[in-house]
Image (cartoon, rainbow, N blue to C red):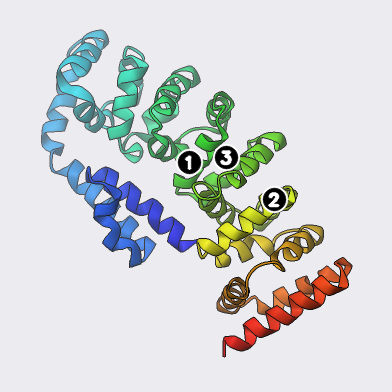
Amino acid sequence: MSRLATRAEIIKLARLLKLEEPQLAFLAQQDVTQIRALRERLSAALYDSSRSRLVRVAAASKLIPVALVATIGQKLYGPLLCARVTGLLAPARAVEVALKLSPRFLADVSVELDPRSAREVIALLPAQCVVAVAQELLTRREYLTMARFVDFLSDVVIREVASTIRDDRALLEIAFFIESPQRLETVIGLLPAERLRGVIRTAAGDVQGLWSEALSMMTQVSPTLRGRMGDLTAALDDAQLTAVIEAVNQGRLWGAWLTVLTAMSADAQRRVLALSAHQTPEALSALATAAREQGIWDQLKPMLALMSAAPRQQLEDFFGRLKSAVRNLG
């Protein structure tokens, strides 16, 4: 999971510095908390470097009508300066100005805005306004920007926004960038059961591009919700579930996958392990290594016993290959 979280942080840092993700690839081996701390310090430094000028702009805006402030902001200042000034305005007045701006321009401002500096303003925005801006951001595939606002929007507004997002892929992309595990849990909990099933199915249908993001999402939530999502995954048809397991192996994601597996119901574990029996010895070795590294080898053993209903030959073959894989670990 940490590798996936690290990638998310690198993407966020690249956005802040106006760079491409490959230009920061050298950070991939760094601890995710260090990359996040660096991003937050740089964000604060960029804001503080122009704070005195921003304070003067905010003060001047109090002297002119709201409609004129909106016009000047959109025509003269531009989205970056407006984003920096937003948190310095009185929240109620900032909302008045926002309602005079087009959703397109507000989307431009959202890309540049650090939500932490304007949390009170965001909380006061009407749901209709937020939904309109979200639709504009969705059109641009600004999933990272949308995720950054999740911590500062109410459940009611998030539910309204989510109901307008028809693309399950987009929901996954947004969830991948949500920083707070608690907020991610809440957002997923707001989804109807059928919608969550569709999200899992969509991720499984695109294992090369989306499955790692879905798996990252599962590892960050509570064991109860993780088990629910794991059971939905185990309920996929054989071809889809096999593709998922193979994607886990190819992406070296066994550690994250085991975290989900241990939260599944017994029936789900049985089905996943039965299909895992067909993996290569190298894959089984990777699975066993991940189990040992996470200290859950003792938890894996009882799961293997769940396969007693499998055909005898398949069961004996699985145990034989697993024993060989473990022996090769030394």
Q: Are marks 3 and 2 in contact (CB under 8 Å)?
A: no
Give the left or right position of residue 67, taking residue 131 as reference.
Answer: left
Secondary-structure class at tag 1: helix
Based on the displayed image, in which of its 4 quarters is residue 147 positioned?
A: top left
Query: Label 1 vs label 2: CA separation?
Result: 24 Å
Q: Nearer the viewer, residue 232 or 71?
A: 232
Task: Please tell me whether mark 1 or mark 2 is closer to you in this view.
Answer: 2
Q: Could you tell whether 5 is left or right of 206 in the image?
A: left
Question: Which residue is denoted by mark 3 in the rendering?
Answer: 187
Q: Position of residue 49 (x, y in %)?
A: 13, 43
Amino acid of disc 2: Ala
What is the C-alpha distance between the residues marked 1 and 3? 13 Å
Residue 92, percent across and down?
Answer: 35, 21
Of the two numbered discs 1 and 3 on the same chain, state the one appearing first in sequence.
1
Q: CA distance from mark 3 to mark 2?
A: 29 Å
- Would residue 121 be visible to someone looking at this image? yes
Tell me which label, 1 or 2, sits earlier in the chain: 1
- Residue type at numbered disc 3: Val
- Of 195 and 185, nearer the camera is 195
Mark 1, residues whose alpha carbon is within 10 Å: few (<14), some, or many (≥20)? many
- The residue drawn where x is 88% and y is 67% is 309
Question: Type of residue at label 1?
Answer: Glu
Numbered mark located on residue 239 in the image = 2
| Farthest-out residue, bottom | 330
- For label 1, the residue is 173
Residue at left 72%, top 69%? 277
Q: Quadrant of the C terminus?
A: bottom right
Q: Residue at x 19, y 48 (%)?
A: 45
57 sits left or right of 211 in the view? left
